[in-house]
Amino acid sequence: MHSCSVWLVAGKILCNGVPIMDYADPGEPILTELLLENVSVGTLSEVSLVVPAGQVVCLSGPSGSGKSRLLRAVADLEPHGGGIFLGETLQQDMPAHEWRSRVVMVPSDSQWWFDEVGGHFPVDAGSRLPPALGFPPEVMGWSVSRLSSGERQRLALWRALSLQPEALLLDEPTANLDGSSTETLETWLLEEIRRRHIATLWVAHDPGQIHRVADAHYGIHGTSVEPVHGSD
């Protein structure tokens, strides 16, 4: 058996002066990025972009250009070509239900399956409702049918975050809200994304919103997705 003198130098573990592995501080969060490599879906082709952990990448484009369809491909809800990775894990290498619990999509028209709001949430979700959403804890007992479109959208965002996702796919999440509600929700949502280190791909059409929330901005031009320079 050979002896080994172990040292930690510049973030690497050395054995007798030879690097053998990177050092990960157990107190540091694991940061998982979302990566698209040459993705093709619908009329879009060779889409490549990176969504870093804790950052927002906005996607814009004309109506019908394929924004929502691209999000569905990333969520493993639409057949596509190319590779989509969560960290180092390829989408095809993970069971679909597990992928969708880690890469969570919030569509522009949220879906509800049970009569009561609370049926869609963990049992303690009502006691943890963020004030920014503007609901009392009793909302968990409300009938879904009494909710306005804006209320459904706000609760759909909280439902998605309750799943503890590593990546979020947001399809115009504030489209049904007025101006003041929109900015309140943006502030809260950005705080959650930063704090939880969630990689977020956010479809938006409002230049003001893109300026407020985006770390990077891509636009759809014909069949391609290209960086929009000067958007920040």
Image (cartoon, rainbow, N blue to C red):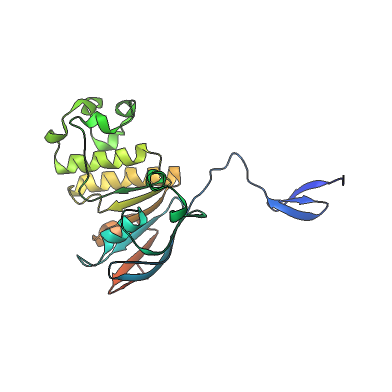
- Residue 105 appears in view: yes
- Residue 52 appears in view: no
Residue 130 image-quadrant placement: top left
- For the residue pair 150 and 96, the one nearer the viewer reads as 96
In the picture shown, does residue 117 fall above or below 69?
above
Residue 106 in picture, x, y percent from top left? 28, 48
Q: In this view, does 50 lie to the left or right of 211?
A: right
In the picture shown, does residue 119 fall above or below 203?
above
**Which residue lies most toward the left here?**
146
Residue 72 in picture, x, y percent from top left? 30, 56
Residue 96 in picture, x, y percent from top left? 39, 48
In the picture shown, does residue 221 fall above or below 36?
below
In the picture shown, does residue 149 fall above or below 208?
above
Q: For the point 45% across and 49% down, which residue is it?
A: 94
Q: For the point 23% across and 49% down, which residue is it?
A: 174
Q: For the point 84% across and 46% down, which residue is it?
A: 4
Residue 165 image-quadrant placement: top left
Q: In this view, does 151 lie to the left or right of 84?
A: left
Residue 223 image-quadrant placement: bottom left
- Give the position of the N terminus as an image quadrant: top right
- Give the position of the C terminus as an image quadrant: bottom left
Label count reads 0
Residue 18 in picture, x, y percent from top left? 79, 56
